[in-house]
Image: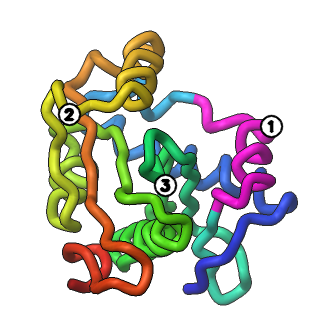
Amino acid sequence: MRIRPATPGDLPALQDVERAAGAPFRDLGMPEIADDDPPTLDELERYRKAGRCWVAADEQDRPTAYLTAEPVDGALHVEQVSVHPRAARRGVGRTLLAHAAEHARERDLRALTLTTFTEVPWNAPYYARLGFRVLSEPELTPGLRRIRAEESAHGLDQWPRVCMRLELPPAGGTSAGLLLGG
């Protein structure tokens, strides 16, 4: 597996990864998530052009997973990380998150943040094992509050959700948490 920046030609494949990664939500009684449309090609292109869309590529250089992120309030916010089920449980998501963490550290961003479902095993419990912690309501930054409001308007609050954060040491410092091997 190789982590690399997404190319314009990858973007339709990222939509396919997103659809496949969403399918297991149906088994958890979350068909709305399973049926949710993937990001549009324009949305993915915006992340790609900004240098914040990475893919995990297989031996044939085909994307099997991807991560998009944007700076939010001094942290790199992981907007989406999706792994195709055929590549699941192999450390692909963790490797993408570690790559995003290094990107953040090189830009003097203090943390990774994300929003996620609390009761989905491959969501909040997984991120907690990687060293992320749940943020309390008073800890939410203005940008995270905006993101949560957008998610709520999109209907994601039908299921319990949280914001999580992984603190990052400065570039050149020691690794943070399990995610970075510390």
Image side of residue 131 versus residue 54, left or right: left
Q: Name the residue under label 1.
A: 42
Counting the numbered discs, the total is: 3
Circle 3 residue: 82
Q: How crowded is mark 2: few (under 14 residues within 10 Å), some or many (20 or more)?
A: few
Q: Position of residue 66 (x, y in %)?
A: 57, 61
Which of disc 3 and disc 2 is earlier in sequence?
Answer: 3
Query: Three-letter amino acid code at disc 3?
Result: Ser
Residues 116 and 88: in front is 116
Q: Residue shown at 16%/57% (left/top)?
A: 128
Amino acid at circle 1: Asp
Residue 44 shown in magenta: yes
* Helix, strand or loop at mark 2: helix
Q: Which one is in front, 141 or 66? A: 141
Bounds of the magenta span?
37-53
Give the residue displayed 20% in from the left and 73% down from the top.
177
Q: In terms of depth relative to the viewer, which is nearer, 172 or 69? A: 172
Quarter of the figure with the C terminus: bottom left
Marks 2, 3: nearer the viewer: 2
Looking at the image, residue 113 sits to the left or right of residue 128; the answer is right
Q: Specify the amino acid type for callout 2.
A: Glu
Residue 6: percent from left, percent from top:
73, 65
Q: Mark 2 points at which residue?
A: 139
Label 3 or label 1, whichever comes before in sequence order: 1
Residue 47: in magenta span: yes
Q: Name the front one of labels 3 and 1.
A: 1
Residue 156 image offset from top left, x and y in percent: 36, 21
Local packing at callout 3 (Cα closer than 10 Å; few below 14, some 14-19, many 20+) is: many
